[in-house]
Amino acid sequence: MVNYKVADESLAEKGKEALYIAENKMPVTAKVIRERFAKEKPLEGIVIAGCLHITKETANLARTLKAGGAEVWLCGSNPLSTQDDVTAALVKEDINVFAWHGNTDEEFYWCIRECLKAKPNILIDDGADMIVTAHKEFPELITSGTIIACQEETTTGVKRFKAMEKKGMLKVPLFPVNDARCKNQFDNELGTGQGVVSAIYGMHVLFAGKNVVIAGYGHCSLGMALRARGLGANVTVTEVDPIKALQAKFAGFNIMPIAKALPDADIILTATGCKHVILPTKENFNALKDGVILGNLGHFDIENLAQISC
């Protein structure tokens, strides 16, 4: 029997259309791997819990894991990314889902706990919340050997687990998926870098001629800088690492301290994983243009003063 709590089950038909689109864009997962899994059943008897962005793409992964014999439980890693039509469609396919768009912090952790109550053997995390919760609230899953392995796919989450490992607090084998070259050099730079620019471009904002400031020059920031320039923007990069700053300079971007870049910026995008890249001060707020767009790429929205009132 499927266990779930979603926003609206009547959205399932719409969700099936979204799944169809994702599967056509992801043929390796949807066809090659799924067909093999359906024959070999390598995950027979395994319970997998994922705290992920519940989108049509994640649904594609969940269906493939189920085809391999796994019992799949899902909760959302970000309340704002959950697609309610997709969750409804997954429930109809006997995938256990606890996620809905816009849930509260209390509801967020309730959903995680419901998945952990299923005694999963493998955890797939996006931001570290599920694995950390397992350590804090479900230690018996670890001491009993129920959880045999975990995965973390974000830069933010991997940093948290490296800190836990250094302190001797990480008690389960963990695969840092974000460290895979295909993840950080392709997904982060090409896919993630395009995502935030696409979101703003979809607001009918013309990038050509705009002054775009990119905070940081890691894989994701590089992707944003390249795409903003490709749309005709005048791109400035701010970076505290001198080697990365030099890389950005040789790639043809303007380089300057962020405080100096603020007054002329039309769009500011951060992707550092650090708090207060734009310090939440009255001086910085007053330096911004009226109507400037502030965007943050990353698991936590802690980087700029868009989250405060001045």
Image (tube, helix red, strand yellow):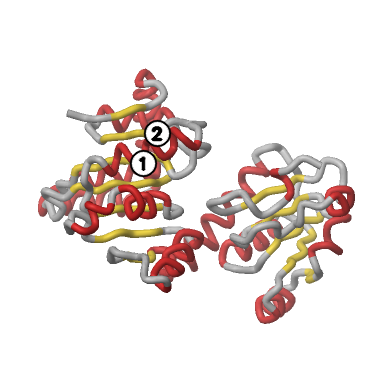
Where does residue 222 sit, x and y in percent of width and height? Answer: 62, 65
In the rendered view, does 205 fall on the left or right side of 209? left
Give residue 99's mark.
2
166 shown above or below 104: below
Q: Residue at x 22, y 52 (%)?
A: 140
Q: Which of the 4 quarters of the picture holds residue 252? A: bottom right
Between 230 and 163, the one nearer to me in the picture: 163
Tag 1: Cα neighbours inside 10 Å, few (<14), some, or many (≥20)? Answer: many
Q: Amino acid at mark 2?
A: Ala
Q: Position of residue 146 (x, y in %)?
A: 18, 54
Please rate how many residues cluster around mark 2, counting C-alpha atoms within 10 Å: few if below 14, some from 14 to 19, many from 20.
Answer: many
Q: Which residue lies most toward the top here? A: 10
Residue 107 appears in the rendering: yes
Q: Nearer the viewer, mark 1 or mark 2?
A: 1
Identify whether 115 is placed above or below 302.
Answer: above
Q: Quadrant of the N terminus?
A: top left
**Residue 46, disc:** none
- The residue under label 1 is 112
**Which quadrant, please, contains the C terminus?**
top right
In the depicted structure, whether residue 68 falls above or below residue 221: above
Image location (x, y in percent) of residue 68: 17, 49
Looking at the rendering, which quadrant does residue 32 occupy?
bottom left
Give the vertical position of 87 relative to 55 (above or below): above
Q: Position of residue 127 (x, y in %)?
A: 45, 53
Quick one: label 1 or label 2, which is nearer the N terminus? 2
Q: Secondary structure at mark 1?
A: helix
